[in-house]
Amino acid sequence: MSSIQWRRWSRFKWLRPKRWSGFSFLFSVALAVVFTVSSCSAQTAEAPSSIKLDFAYYNPVSLVLRDQKWLEDDLAQDNVKVEWVQSLGSNKALELLNSRSIDFGSTAGAAALLGKANGNPIKAVYIYSKPEWTALVTRDATINRVEDLRGKKVAATRGTDPHIFLLRALDQVGLSEQDIELVQLQHPDGKTALERGDVDAWAGLDPHMATTELEQGSRLFFRNPDLNTYGFLNVREAFAEQYPGYVERVLTAYEKARQWAIENPDELKTILAREAKLSDAVAAKQLERTDLTSPVIGAIHKETIVAAGDVLKRSGVIPNTVEVEQVANDLVDPQFAEKIAG
């Protein structure tokens, strides 16, 4: 370095630490802004803006929860809204889940298995009931056994527990859907078709089934509670992964509603009758066929839906390539219910 260069460097070197200090300060401020924004974004992501649940007349606990507003009260502190959407059947609940129109949906266990096998990204996290909510119903005096359905018109809603119940009933006597004329109708329309005589039988669902039984004299000619799969509360997988704490809070509210329903049977009947526009007698008939005592989902529920899945494979509803037991394992997730009710 020349003497001139040395003098120039010496003259200005005292500025260098200050200039570096200023840069450090600005750099630190920039980093702080970035981390603050990131932190705020992370905190925002921890809470959804709303949680969407279905309510269904075949899920009395959902009616209690909606009526009592316990979930709304809990989530208000986080400014999380609660939105309710009606499901008319398991197939509709699965459609709503798949389209992200709801985050939690009520289905029968076998219907949830069918949805999962068809690629619906859901987890079954809670049992809202063990019901006898379906049976085979007729007004035809010549139909008294499942075998009598050969060649008959039978109304059912595809992809729901009544439809699967029908397939399992046929399978037990060596028949299949090919041996009947299946008339695809939503549950309320199936009831109407039966009462008008447009179909010979109907795979019924409460409360519509109880209504036609008590008010129109329709007969439940084939019943088997063991062929009814449980009431599964399902959550979208993406929601459960992003907001596991809120899954627990929803189930905690469900638990409160379930226990209240058990402790207040008259009030439960009143809520069901009012919401579904039923007589007290019809509401009571539905509830006497509904067991609300065991909310934790687990091995027994897997076994039940696997048995249903095997029949669905034989009937061609589920492809032979599907590993039913693996689908059931992927579907049933007991961790949340075990924490709050185990």
Image (cartoon, helix red, strand yellow):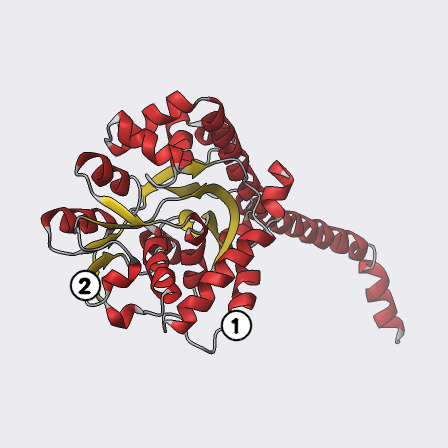
Under mark 1, the amino acid is Glu
Q: Nearer the viewer, residue 162 or 143?
A: 143
The answer to whether residue 176 is above or below residue 234 is below
Q: Which mark is residue 323?
A: 1
Q: Position of residue 324 (x, y in %)?
A: 51, 68
Q: Quadrant of the C terminus?
A: top right
For mark 2, give the secondary structure: loop
Nearest the eye: 204 or 234: 204
Residue drawn at x 82%, y 65% is 8
Q: Picture coordinates of residue 45 (x, y %)?
A: 53, 47
Relative image position of residue 186 (x, y in whole percent): 23, 53
Q: Residues within 10 Å of mark 1 (few under 14, many from 20)?
A: some
* Up/down of 116 relative to 71, above or below: below
Observer-nearest of 31 and 45: 45
Q: From where the camera sits, is residue 230 visible?
A: yes
Q: Residue at x 42, y 54 (%)?
A: 227
In the rendering, at what x and y percent does residue 313 appear?
Answer: 42, 71
Mark 2: few/some/many CA within 10 Å (<14, 14-19, 20+): some
Residue type, mark 2 in image? Lys
The answer to whether the residue labelled 1 contacts the one labelled 2, judged by CB atoms less than 8 Å apart, is no
Image point 37% across, 27% down: which residue? 67
Among the two numbered marks 1 and 2 on one chain, the one whose residue lies closer to the N terminus: 2
Marks 1 and 2 sit apart, C-alpha to C-alpha, by: 33 Å
In which quadrant of the rendered image does the N terminus lie?
bottom right
Choose mark 1 or mark 2, whichever is in front. Answer: 2
Q: Secondary structure at mark 1?
A: loop
Res 161 quadrant in image: bottom left
Residue that protrudes farthest toward the bottom in the picture: 321
* Residue 76 visible in the displayed image: no
> In the image, is residue 309 above or below residue 15?
below
Q: Residue at x 32, y 49 (%)?
A: 135
Q: Label 2, on which residue?
A: 152
